[in-house]
Image: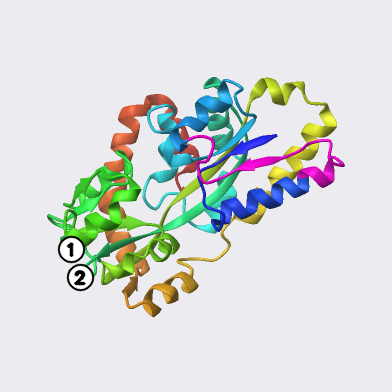
């Protein structure tokens, strides 16, 4: 079982997949040899789907944000402030909504066996000041995230700029863009604090790492082997669920210790941004997904 993924060795999903490999080998008495190829050493992130679907490799971990135009319904998880709390994460995994998306992935030639939680928070970084209120976003050139999520940034008055991750640091340093957006822990590992003095953090949406396998390979496995692999994947998913409310204080401490001024949005401040961003992103989501999108939203949206 060869698994391709894009994460560096210290990334929490990379560590979790290493444990998954050990669990599978132990549960199958080494009948399954799990080989992990991380950091994009076998395939680039956007190549993993095709590699698994074609059978070039048995499995891959694919960040849910990367399904993009292939499965537009997957973008339901990036609607601002819709799925971010621990309760929402637990409710989504194994739900009818997640099963609908599993079927969408199956239609594209891969079988999903795990919704591994990647992150549920983001930080807006800037060299000019904290970005707390809608007016703080007006006219700001900010690194975009996905075309759908960027509709929310545009609704705040910002101008999203598409940049590959490798160019963001330099673009922030040279002023090509005014602000960045990334996970709170990633802001530290990417050393944004060296070129950005301010950060505004919030749990805003959920990103998953989908553990997908080639359907033919999966179907040809003996039932006991499939069960052992699935049980190990379920354990990886369970351990990934973020149980704390809000932003991880350790991540904030790391940034403030490096000299960045960080503000964690209050519930009231979140409500103001949510009421502007969420409708814009929902509208764009429904325009792309139609009835399937409406069905997913009706299942996920709080009642």
Residue 253 percent coordinates (x, y): 43, 76
Q: Which residues are magenta?
A: 24-43
The image shows residue 37, relative to residue 197, as above or below, that is above
Q: Residues within 10 Å of mark 1 (few under 14, many from 20)?
A: some
Instruction: Identify the residue at image location x=24%, y=49%.
Output: 153
Label 2: how many residues lie within 10 Å, few (<14), some (14-19) or many (20+)?
some
Q: Which mark is residue 196?
A: none
Is residue 126 inside the magenta stretch? no
Give 30 or 97, whichever is nearer the viewer. Answer: 30
Give the residue pinned by disc 1: 136
Front residue of this view, candidates 115 and 285: 115
Along the polypeptide, which appears first: circle 2 or circle 1?
A: 2
Q: How many marks?
A: 2
Residue at horizontal 25 percent and vertical 56 percent from the top: 170
Asked which secondary structure carries label 2, the reply is: loop
When the figure is inspected, residue 199 is found, relative to residue 69, above or below; the finding is: below
Where 179 sits versus 254, above or below?
above
Question: Which one is in front, 21 or 95?
Answer: 21
Element marked by disc 1: helix
Asked where in the image residue 185 lies, by quadrant, the reply is: bottom left
Mark 1 and mark 2 in contact (Cβ < 8 Å)? yes
In the image, farthest residue toward the front: 41
Q: Quadrant of residue 261?
A: bottom left
Image coords of residue 146 (percent x, y): 33, 41
Quadrant where the N terminus is found in the figure? top right
The structure residue drawn at horizontal position 30% and vertical position 66%, both measured from the top left corner, is 269
**235 sits to left or right of 266:** right
Q: Determine which residue is flagged by label 2.
A: 129
Residue 87 on image: x %, y %: 55, 56
């Amino acid at each position: 079982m060869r698994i391709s993924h894009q994460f560096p060795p210290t990334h929490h999903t990379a560590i979790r997949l290493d444990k998954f490999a050990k669990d599978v080998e132990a549960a199958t008495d080494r009948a399954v040899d799990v080989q992990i190829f991380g950091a994009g050493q076998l395939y680039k992130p956007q190549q993993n789907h095709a590699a698994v679907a074609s059978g070039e490799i048995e499995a891959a971990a694919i960040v849910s944000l990367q399904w993009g135009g292939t499965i537009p319904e997957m973008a339901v998880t990036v609607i601002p402030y819709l799925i971010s709390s621990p309760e929402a994460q637990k409710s989504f995994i194994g739900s009818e909504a997640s099963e609908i998306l599993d079927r969408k992935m199956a239609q594209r030639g891969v079988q999903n066996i795990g919704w591994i939680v990647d992150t549920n928070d983001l930080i807006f970084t800037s060299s000019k000041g904290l970005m707390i209120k809608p007016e703080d976003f007006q006219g700001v050139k900010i690194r975009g995230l996905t075309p759908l999520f960027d509709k929310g940034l545009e609704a705040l008055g910002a101008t999203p700029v598409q940049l590959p991750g490798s160019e963001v640091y330099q673009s922030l340093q040279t002023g090509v863009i005014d602000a960045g957006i990334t996970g709170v822990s990633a802001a530290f590992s990417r050393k944004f604090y060296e070129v950005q003095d301010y950060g505004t953090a919030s749990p805003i949406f959920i990103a998953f790492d989908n553990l997908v396998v080639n359907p033919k390979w999966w179907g040809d496995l003996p039932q006991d082997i499939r069960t052992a692999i699935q049980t190990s994947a379920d354990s990886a998913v369970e351990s990934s669920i973020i149980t704390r409310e809000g932003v991880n204080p350790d991540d904030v401490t790391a940034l403030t210790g490096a000299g960045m001024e960080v503000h964690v949005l209050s519930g009231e401040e979140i409500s103001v941004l949510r009421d502007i961003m969420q409708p814009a992103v929902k509208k764009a989501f429904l325009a792309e997904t139609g009835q399937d999108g409406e069905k997913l939203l009706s299942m996920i949206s709080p009642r």
